[in-house]
Amino acid sequence: MEVPMTVVFDRDGVQDSAARLRDGRIQLAPDSWPGRGWAPAHQEIAELCAIAPTDIGGVLRGLTTAQKIFDGLPPPAGNRVAAFNSLYFTITDRVARSLSTANVRDAAFLELLDVEFAKRYFHALSLWGADDDSTPDAWEVLFRRAQDGEVSKLTAAMLGVNAHINHDLALALIATWEQLGPPDEDRVHPDYLLINKIFFEEIPDLRRRYSTPWQLRLDDLVGTLDDWSQRVLVSATRARAWEQGERLWALREDPDDLARALLVMDRVSSYLGEVLVAGDQFVTRVGTVLGRHR
């Protein structure tokens, strides 16, 4: 598939959108935030992120090390970044095991995409640990709530998925295309869609792994509806990431326009994250009230 090399780009509209998204997020977010950093594991995270993975085995080793670190951070057995990291490892392990199967057309593309994808996560961890204000807003939504017991583990995992897909995936696609050539939808897109299938197969167990008793009760009431709706969400967000990657690819020769587009992408992701948190808090309050009246 030939991707157009030029796109219509509304600079003023993009700048206005970025400002409005920032204001909207401020209205949703708490008035005060804890500071950045991974105390008391600053050094461990810094060492973990100092060397970028070069293959999917390195990604899995990095995620395993990260899991040990986050499992040891407060609150005991409840760090919210640990919840996402665990989910991420599960999906990546499935991808690694699929690379040698007949289902994959271009294993080099899929593995490199996975590596570039993971680099964005580890880089965000590194920035946060260094108290760097260039940490993507999309990741900040989760990282600031790493020790927040009022955010359910299920929502924390979803916050990580939101940041990683809605912010990082398009960037990983661009980095992959820069190394392997421009996007060829006919050749590699089926492999890209294979990740959707892996998500679909893992979603039921992953959701129940992180659910509270109230969330499990609600899950039983709605039956397979949650599975279906989350499959639709994964399909839609990953399709949008591919399209976003194509648009950013067309802007890559103009650093200013690319920076504007990346800012809006980050702000959209962070706003969606705050909406997820607000929804989680509402459901938790409803569950508490109903639990008192049982």
Image: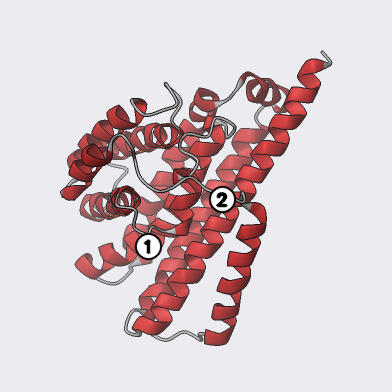
Q: Is residue 274 left or right of residue 134?
A: right
Residue 235 is marked as none
Q: Label 2 is placed on what type of residue?
A: Gly
- Residue at (32%, 84%) from the top-left corner? 253
Check disc 2 and report the residue beneath it.
Answer: 273
Q: Position of residue 226 (x, y in %)?
A: 64, 34
Check disc 1 and report the residue beneath it.
Answer: 134
Q: Secondary structure at mark 1?
A: loop
The relative height of residue 189 versus residue 32 in the rendered view (above or below) is below
Q: Quadrant for residue 247, please give it.
A: bottom left
| Tag count | 2
Name the image colouring: secondary structure
The relative height of residue 146 versus residue 251 in the rendered view (above or below) is above
Q: Is residue 106 left or right of residue 158?
A: left
The relative height of residue 182 versus residue 143 in the rendered view (above or below) is below
Q: Is residue 184 at all visible to an observer of this figure?
A: yes
Q: Position of residue 60 (x, y in %)?
A: 24, 36
Along the viewing direction, whichever of 255 and 204 lies nearer the viewer: 255
Q: Circle 2: is it few (<14), some (14-19), or many (20+) Cα within 10 Å?
A: many
- Residue at (46%, 60%) from the top-left corner? 241
Q: Circle 1: is it few (<14), some (14-19), or many (20+) Cα within 10 Å?
A: few
In this view, the mark in front (2 or 1): 1
Q: Is residue 257 left or right of residue 68?
A: right
The quarter of the image holding the C terminus is: top right
Along the viewing direction, whichever of 248 and 293 lies nearer the viewer: 293
Q: Position of residue 110 (x, y in %)?
A: 28, 51
Q: Is residue 76 left or right of residue 109?
A: right
